Amino acid sequence: MSKLVAQAHAYPSTLRPFKTASGKSGRLYSLPALSKQFPNIKRLPISMRIVLESVLRNCDGQRVTADHVAQVANWQPNAPRTHEIPFLVSRVVLQDFTGVPLLADLAAMRSVAVQLGMAARSASSGTPVKSCNTTRDTRKGISCVRGALGCQ
């Protein structure tokens, strides 16, 4: 198994500090800062800005490259689609009726991986996944938890 070598971010000037209302600090990759290099960003649809933020945040020079960032930043609605863009989400939340089939698919893929002599973990989502039960009984139970919205 090859090791990923950490590389300098291709757009380091886009990393900006921020503070939350509670005083906690964090850092984010700023699309307004990136728009200094790619002015078209301001005209991108919101959905493409979401993809661009993900690509910029995950730009590691290997899975996501500076070229991927530039391709999304320069996106044109009627241009031919010749390259795939890696879209890496931070988290996936699944309701119980979508999560169970997904877990069954993942288990099947892991079983096939083992049959092919590979490690079961090679078939992985690569993203943290949280399954939540949204049945009426669960919602009722949660709503009665002390401090929950609407409880007295």
Image: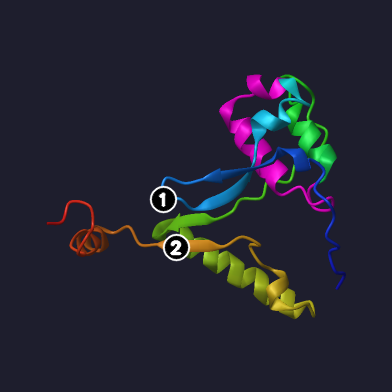
The residue positioned 72% from the left and 31% from the top of the image is 34
Q: Position of residue 89 (x, y in %)?
A: 61, 50
63 sits left or right of 18 in the view: right
The tag on residue 22 is 1
77 sits left or right of 10 in the view: left
Rate crowding at label 1 as few (under 14), some (14 to 19) or many (20 or more) other CA atoms within 10 Å: few
Residue 135 painted magenta: no
Front residue of 82 and 111: 82
First in sequence: mark 2 vs mark 1: 1
Residue 44 painted magenta: yes
Rate crowding at label 2 as few (under 14), some (14 to 19) or many (20 or more) other CA atoms within 10 Å: some
Q: Among all residues in the image, which is located at the extreme left?
A: 152
For the stretch drawn in magenta, the main secondary structure is helix
Q: Give the answer, above or below, for where 15 lies relative to 103.
A: above
Q: Find numbered disc 1 in the image and state the secondary structure of the residue it sits on.
A: loop
Q: Position of residue 20 (x, y in %)?
A: 47, 46
The residue positioned 71% from the left and 42% from the top of the image is 56
What residue does disc 2 label?
A: 131
The residue positioned 82% from the left and 45% from the top of the image is 65
**Quarter in which the N terminus is drawn:** bottom right
Q: Position of residue 36 (x, y in %)?
A: 74, 25
